[in-house]
Amino acid sequence: METPLISLAIALVGGLMLSRLTKLFHLPAVTAYLVAGLLLGPFCIGALKIPGFGFNSLEEVEGLSIVTQTALGFIAFTIGNEFRLSQLKTMGKGAIVIGIGQAVITTLLVDAVLIALHFCFPNIISLPCAIVLGAIASATAPAATLMVVRQYKADGPLTRLLMLVVAIDDAVGLVLFSVSYGIATALSNGQVSVLAVVIEPIVEIVLSLGLGAIMGLLLDWTEQFFHSRSKRMTISVAFVLLAVGLSTLKFHIGPVHCGFSLLLVCMMTGTIFCNICDTSEELMNRVDGWTMPLNVLFFVISGAELDLNVLVQPVTILVGVIYILARSAGKWFGSDVSCHLTHQSKPIQQNLGITLLPQAGVALGMALTAANLADGALARNVVLFAVLVYELVGPSLTKRSLMKVGEIRPEGRVSARTLNQEKTN
């Protein structure tokens, strides 16, 4: 029991200390946490096999999935706060069009490039693998984006639109992946399953949104029995944990495989709660403060999960570079086209696509499912390689884009300790 606790403590301290170093280079703290994870992971310090000092194996890192899943649940719950009716009335339609448009265009572009690669060099990548990678390319990492926005207290039209688009992107990505995976499986097995391609993705989304709505209503009802801020924050945390736990359930209704999307469940819980509870904004701020250490652990563990073995596989690097270039072009072009259709301002048109490049947890989850295909190992390794690149570079690009449009203020040089001393004086 003590060894995992020591590992988590070192992960927290290591991530925070490294963030002081990256601050000198004006890099987001997210990058520091990911690099700390790489250093503490099984391919660096963890390879020394010192119990408690770093993560000694990928299996040990995977054993901490409860931490990453919980953190992802709180991140999704917080993003649900962005779906307030006041914001949806002003930019809801545009966000939906952009969220769907850029995801679909990215998938089509990556599919086209990788399918062309298959026909030119069939020994490098199979057709099912190419189709699945196209769908995985649509996914954007909400966690990295949210952390950059929080760290620099970004606010403005682009930031607000970005948070809505990232949330919608995950729902669209789930549908695109489910359909693409069904098609890829059909190509591998020689038969098309309507259940896998059409019905099961719809059932998963409907069930997730329904469960999230129920959780949001129950949270609002339960909150009314408590008046102190600490107790109301505690009940909010309890409900997010419950939503995360319930979202892992899987069952069958006849021949239909039913399950939930953790992101959609927790996002819907936050959306319903923030729209019906008068004090939700104050509670959200308190929950954000409570979950900060959890978020640091999420990124450090995510960094430790990155399998550096993919860097010694020439085929993976070749397909990975093509995938990264095609996906980046798809996100930029898809966002540009969608912003034109919705008449967004020029700064948003020019910068939104760059902020959608980070990719991590959702894509990795899809890649694990894709690994079940005959050529699934390549798909998983390509996504691992892409995540390694995107997570290290993406947060800095997001910060740069938000600074470019003036939605991030220059970083102050006054510490919290100094501010507290000034307040007491």
Image (tube, grey):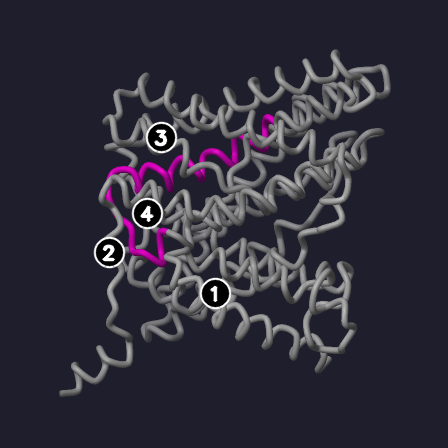
* Amino acid type assigned to the residue bearing label 3 in the image: Ala
Q: Are marks 4 and 3 in contact (CB under 8 Å)?
A: no
- Under mark 2, the amino acid is Pro
Q: Amino acid at mark 1?
A: Val
Residue hosting label 1: 237
The residue furthest left is: 425
Within-10-Å neighbours for mark 4: few <14, some 14–19, many 20+: many
| Of labels 4 and 3, the one closer to you | 3
SS class of the residue under badge 4?
helix
Rounded to the nearest whole Å, what is the CA distance between mark 1 and mark 3?
28 Å
Q: Earlier in the sequence, mark 4 or mark 3?
A: 3
Tag in front: 4 or 1: 1
For mark 4, what is the residue?
275
Which residue is identified by label 3?
95
**For residue 23, which numbered disc appears in the image?**
none
Q: Determine if the magenta segment contains residue 402.
A: no
Q: Earlier in the sequence, mark 1 or mark 2?
A: 1
